[in-house]
């Protein structure tokens, strides 16, 4: 099956700092989503981005499908950004999301 | 519009028991998928249903089963519970289940003692 690797596994930030999270995948995909999982377990959709670049407030994401990676940028981080960020993909002609191991982010005040 | 809803929110069972988890998708969505997330890991795919038919199954034992109803809601059943079944069970909703955005419910936390 398709492999999804996220880095770094853990990230500690000071409030106001910027950061980049990376997601590498091993095969062609027709879906790539970034999620933020809050402390209560809710997976919150951040981006649906199988290719290209999108921005939503302080967050932006870029997927380079030909090189099989995606980046999530967090700017001016806030304590509410703490949690686990997951990248998940569906391979071409597939129908199930395969998740990476996540990046655990802690933003300190 | 309401998002994906799941019930119950929390559940405690003992080994060997059976459990039924329920999910209602977003209005207009016809596909429901189930995922299991154990502590410290990413969610793992269990099942996908579309128009009441099983479209995909992950690497889970036959103790796990599911079904989808005419109103597109779904149930996940787990028989003969094991300690290792303790996890967060997540339901995802999408329009047709191929390639488009999937939206997750709040999950059901199952603890098996």
Image: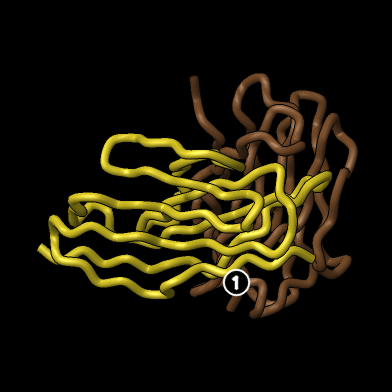
Chain colours: A yellow, B brown
Q: Kindly state the secondary structure of the residue where label 1 is placed.
A: loop
Q: Using the rendered view, name the quadrant where residue B59 is placed.
A: bottom right
Instruction: Give the side of residue B46 with respect to residue B109, left or right.
Output: right
**Residue A26 in the image, given as x and y percentages of width and height:** 70, 64
Residue drawn at point x = 71 percent, y = 58 percent: B45
Q: Please state the total of marks drawn on the protein image.
A: 1
Identify the residue at the far left of this view: A109
**Residue A61 in the image, given as x and y percentages of width and height:** 43, 45
Q: Which residue is mark 1?
A: B86
Q: Is residue B96 above or below residue A24?
A: above
Instruction: Give the side of residue A72 with respect to residue B49, left or right.
Output: left
Residue drawn at point x = 58 percent, y = 41 percent: A51
The quarter in which the N terminus of chain A is drawn is: bottom right
**Residue B6 in the image, given as x and y percentages of width and height:** 57, 42
| Front-lying residue, A78 or B91 | A78
Residue drawn at point x = 37 percent, y = 54 percent: A38
Q: Residues within 10 Å of mark 1 (few under 14, many from 20)?
A: many
Q: Using the rendered view, name the quadrant where residue B42 is placed.
A: bottom right
**Residue B49 in the image, given as x and y percentages of width and height:** 81, 40
């Amino acid at each position: 099956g398709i492999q999804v690797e996220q880095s770094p596994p853990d990230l500690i930030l000071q409030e106001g700092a910027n950061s980049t999270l990376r997601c590498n995948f091993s095969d062609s995909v027709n879906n790539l989503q970034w999620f933020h999982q809050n402390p209560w377990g809710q997976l919150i959709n951040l981006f649906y981005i199988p290719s290209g670049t999108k921005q939503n407030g302080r967050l932006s994401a870029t997927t380079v499908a030909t090189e099989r990676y995606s980046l999530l940028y967090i700017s001016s981080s806030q304590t509410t950004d703490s949690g686990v960020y997951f990248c998940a993909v569906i391979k071409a002609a597939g129908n199930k999301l395969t998740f990476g191991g996540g990046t655990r982010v802690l933003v300190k005040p | 519009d309401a998002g994906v809803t799941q019930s119950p929110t929390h559940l405690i069972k003992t080994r060997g028991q059976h459990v039924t988890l329920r999910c209602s998708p977003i209005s207009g969505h016809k596909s429901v998928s189930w995922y299991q997330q154990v502590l410290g890991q990413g969610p793992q795919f269990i099942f996908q249903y579309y128009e009441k038919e099983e479209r995909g199954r992950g690497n889970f034992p036959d103790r796990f089963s599911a079904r989808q109803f005419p109103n597109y809601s779904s149930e996940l059943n787990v028989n003969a519970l094991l300690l290792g079944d303790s996890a967060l069970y997540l339901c995802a909703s999408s329009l047709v289940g191929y390639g488009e955005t999937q939206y997750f419910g709040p999950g059901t936390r199952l603890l098996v003692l």
